[in-house]
Amino acid sequence: MDGIITAGLIGVSLGAQYALLALGFTLIFGILGVVNFAHGGFYVLGGYLTYYFSASLGLPYALALLLAVLGSGLLGYLLETLILERVIKDSQSTLMVTLGFYLIMTTAFVMTFGPEAPQFPFPVTGVWRHGGVYFPYANLIVLMVSLLAIVFVYWLVYRTNVGRSLRAMSEERQVASALGMRTKTLFPFAFALATGLAGLTGGLVTPILSLTPHIGDPVLATSFLIVILGGLGSVTGATVAAFIVGMVEAYSAVYLGGSKGALALFLLVLVVLVVKPSGLMGKEARKA
């Protein structure tokens, strides 16, 4: 029983991390109609910026993480404003631009920090124990910060005028523009928000796992899988799917092993898509 509870706690922590990644990914697709292949690169960028500010400059980890989020968001803002905005109506061009930008980011990471993982431990160590149940303090902190960020995103999207405008553009972009909504301002803001969330996840998680230039590849694959499972463009669907994937990964890793756990996850996605091709909470995808 203790093992089941421990695995469940790890699953919830994984789900919160995946939700941050998936929320950013689905926001960009739902609002801009862009599948952002550079999303994993911003995750890695958040990790390296946090590492640089904390390990190299000696700043407190919390401040380094905040600066990493701002830096990731700023780069995302510039990418959308200077490059993507010019090709936003061509889905193939946006795919090529984001993929190319990810390759540039990866090369820059290798040239700047080297191919090997740096020494970048999480600043808090130790384990919380209650009977036979245990949970690392690092994972607990990541879980709490991730949940706060998720709540902030939901508040922004569903309780503010900016969020209402973003949702209106995701439903019908031309009508929203005709009503006077400033797409030239809101599109870069949405992209900056999404890349900032990716950077936040990277700064939180890479000290616990590892930080290498190519770690963004599996991050992109996981984000894409979660968004497809939840339904492209659905914020709630991405959140629910993220926690499902986190729980499946945690329990399958404990009771099935790594390879069988991955198989169980893909079988789950396959079954869901066969029953409901649009995903758990998705609608028919609009054309970009």
Image (cartoon, helix red, strand yellow):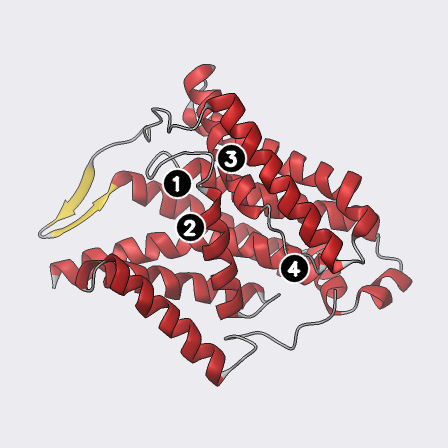
Q: Residue at x 86, y 60 (%)?
A: 177
- In front of the other: 267 or 208: 267
Residue type, numbered disc 4: Phe
Residue type, numbered disc 2: Gln
- Left or right of residue 163: residue 19: left
| Distance between the alpha carbons at the discs numbered 2 and 4 | 19 Å
Residue type, numbered disc 3: Gly
Mark 4 or mark 3: whose residue is earlier in sequence: 4
Q: Is residue 143 above or below residue 52?
A: below
Q: Which residue is mark 2?
A: 17
Q: Residue at x 19, y 43 (%)?
A: 128
Mark 3 or mark 1: whose residue is earlier in sequence: 3
Q: Which structural element holds mark 2?
A: helix
Q: Which structural element holds mark 4?
A: helix
Mark 2 or mark 3: whose residue is earlier in sequence: 2
Q: Which residue is mark 1?
A: 205
- Left or right of residue 44: residue 271: left
Q: Are marks 1 and 2 in contact (CB under 8 Å)?
A: yes
For label 2, count other residues whose C-alpha is less than 10 Å away and answer few (under 14), some (14-19) or many (20+): many
Mark 1 or mark 2: whose residue is earlier in sequence: 2
Pick out the residue farthest to the bottom: 275
For label 1, count other residues whose C-alpha is less than 10 Å away and answer few (under 14), some (14-19) or many (20+): many
